[in-house]
Amino acid sequence: MRKQDGFSLIELLIVVAIILIIAAIAIPNVLRARIAANESAAVATLKTMNTAETSYTVAYPNCGYVDLPALGGDGSGPGAAGVLDNVFPDRDGYHFAINLSGAGGACGPTSGATYDIQASPTGTITSERYFYTDVTSVIRFNIGGPAGPSDSVI
């Protein structure tokens, strides 16, 4: 009898097949968890942005609502209020946009009497749900397309 060193080709193929089966089971679960985390972060960001808009109107009552750059900054005035940290339009797999409407306040053309915020996924792996909120602070969602004021509430 010969002494055998190492593994046979069949044994190695069986181990590789088992690893592939485990990966096929795990990868979809990881993607679903990532999508859920991105959606939760987007909803939390929308809540924070609503709070920032409210804080801004309390601090500067003559200005109305403003866009993202005016909410950020160093707190030196209405154009850089400092009520929102990390003012980035894209984060956590979503793009955030503040849409102002109505007559602006005394603080310039980047202010409005009302606002709405759209959160759109930046990729298909990110999510399929779009989010919307406005001065009512009610967060709404739509699957597959931009959300609006008549869509389902979260």
Image (cartoon, helix red, strand yellow):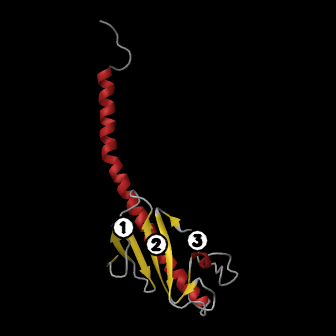
Q: Amino acid at mark 1?
A: Arg
Q: Using the image as rendered, state which of residue 71 and residue 44 is in the foreground.
A: 71
For the residues labelled 2 and 3, the Cα–Cα distance comes to 14 Å
- Residue located 44% across and 71% down the image: 119
The residue tagged 1 is 129
Q: What distance separates the C-alpha of mark 3 from that of mark 1?
A: 22 Å
Task: Using the image, tell me which numbered label, if any, was put on residue 87.
Answer: 3
In the image, residue 35 above or below residue 19: below
The mark closer to the camera, 1 or 2, is 1
Q: Amino acid at mark 2?
A: Ala
Q: Position of residue 39 (x, y in %)?
A: 41, 66
| Residue at horizontal 46 percent and vertical 72 percent from the top | 44
Query: Which amino acid type corresponds to the residue marked 3 in the rendered image?
Result: Val
Q: Nearer the viewer, mark 2 or mark 3?
A: 3
Residue 57 lies in what quarter of the image? bottom right
Foreground residue among 12 and 53: 53
Which residue is label 2 attached to? 44
